[in-house]
Image: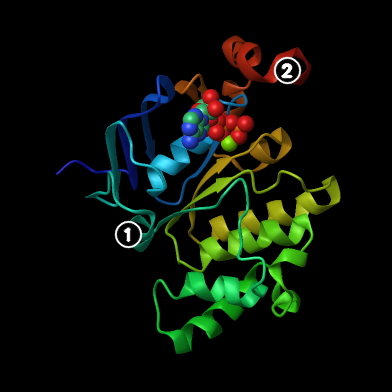
Amino acid sequence: MALMSLLEVQGLTKTFAGLTAVSSVDISVEDREFLGIIGPNGAGKTTLFSLLAGSLPPTEGRVVFDGVDVTGWSAQKVARTGLVRTFQLMRPFESMSVLENVTIASLANRSRKDARRHALGVLERVQLAQYAGTSSGSLPTAGLKRLELARALAMEPRMILLDEVLAGLVPAERAPMIELLRDLHADGLSVMFVEHIMAAVMALSERLVVMHDGRVLTQGVPAEVIAEPQVIEAYLGEDYA
Ligand SMILES: Nc1ncnc2c1ncn2[C@@H]1O[C@H](COP(=O)(O)OP(=O)(O)OP(=O)(O)O)[C@@H](O)[C@H]1O
Ligand SMILES: [Mg+2]
């Protein structure tokens, strides 16, 4: 049997009423890899995550995770295989506490009795434990970003799909988040990381995929990819290079 990557994506396509948001995407992600994904607004990055995590059904193509064809499965069912996303637009249950929000996610894999204890451990991990009793709606952006991460981690992913978890953070808040992501990866988590903040992308990514108009424009070693003229033209601009 051929050796498979942890995630194998083949010919993945999503069409919305005539607009092709994701177009014949082929991507493989290895176990324990940290893969960065960049591209201009509307390139299809969030839609790709929605297709991978079961938030949207694809129009065409296949998603195989850990050897299992999960194409068209519900988000809940995909999450149980170990593939979990965060949302670019965070949507916690605002009237519930931070701990309750994470406990709900923990319930995916454990009993009610264990879920609360497990959720507390996850809050410790993302340094939100002191806000456990705070209502989620009153968290500032940095807290909401960590809550979004905590809800995903509570489902015990093997691979996490992070959609702009640094967006909206002021520069002083970014470094501790980057540090946390590095630690999670070092502990064995596989990561796909969509982000516009290039310093973070370059600090964390082992490999880089560039999306443009729903397609993979190029991929490879980050330092080489960002020097490609087509990437500068489509996304980065002359300033970055
Ligand atoms: N539910 C939807 N219905 C119709 N069109 C959609 C839907 N979701 C996304 N699109 C369109 O698909 C394209 C890709 O959007 P997507 O949100 O995936 O881009 P993105 O790369 O995540 O952009 P950004 O960097 O701004 O977050 C856009 O043209 C968008 O308007
Ligand atoms: Mg997006």
Marks 1/2: CA distance? 42 Å
Identify the element where label 1 is drawn.
helix
Q: Quadrant of the N terminus?
A: top left
Kindly tell me whether mark 2's CB lies below 8 Å from ligand 1: no
Q: Identify the image quadrant of residue 228.
A: top right
Please determine whether, in this image, residue 225 is positioned above or below residue 119.
Answer: above
Residue pictured at 75% horizontal, 21% vertical: 240
Q: Name the mark nearer the viewer: 1 or 2.
A: 1
The reply to whether residue 172 is visible in this rendering is yes
Q: Residue at 83% x, 47% y: name it.
A: 170
Furthest residue toward left: 1
> Which quadrant of the picture is home to ligand 2?
top right
**Which numbered dot is residue 241?**
2
* Residue positioned 71% across, 80% down in the render: 133
Q: Please name whichever residue, 96 or 62, is drawn nearer the observer in this view of the structure.
A: 96
Q: In the image, what residue type sits under mark 1? A: Lys
Q: Which residue is mark 1?
A: 77
The correct choice, above or below, for 176 with respect to 48 in the image is below
Which comes before the other along the chain, label 1 or label 2?
1
Residue 15 location (% of width, % of height): 38, 26
Say which element carries label 2: loop
Q: Residues within 10 Å of mark 2 (few under 14, many from 20)?
A: few
Indicate the position of residue 123 as horizontal and vertical percent values.
Answer: 64, 73
The three-letter amino acid code for the residue at tag 2 is: Ala
Q: Quadrant of the C terminus?
A: top right
Q: Tag 1: Cα neighbours inside 10 Å, few (<14), some, or many (≥20)? A: some
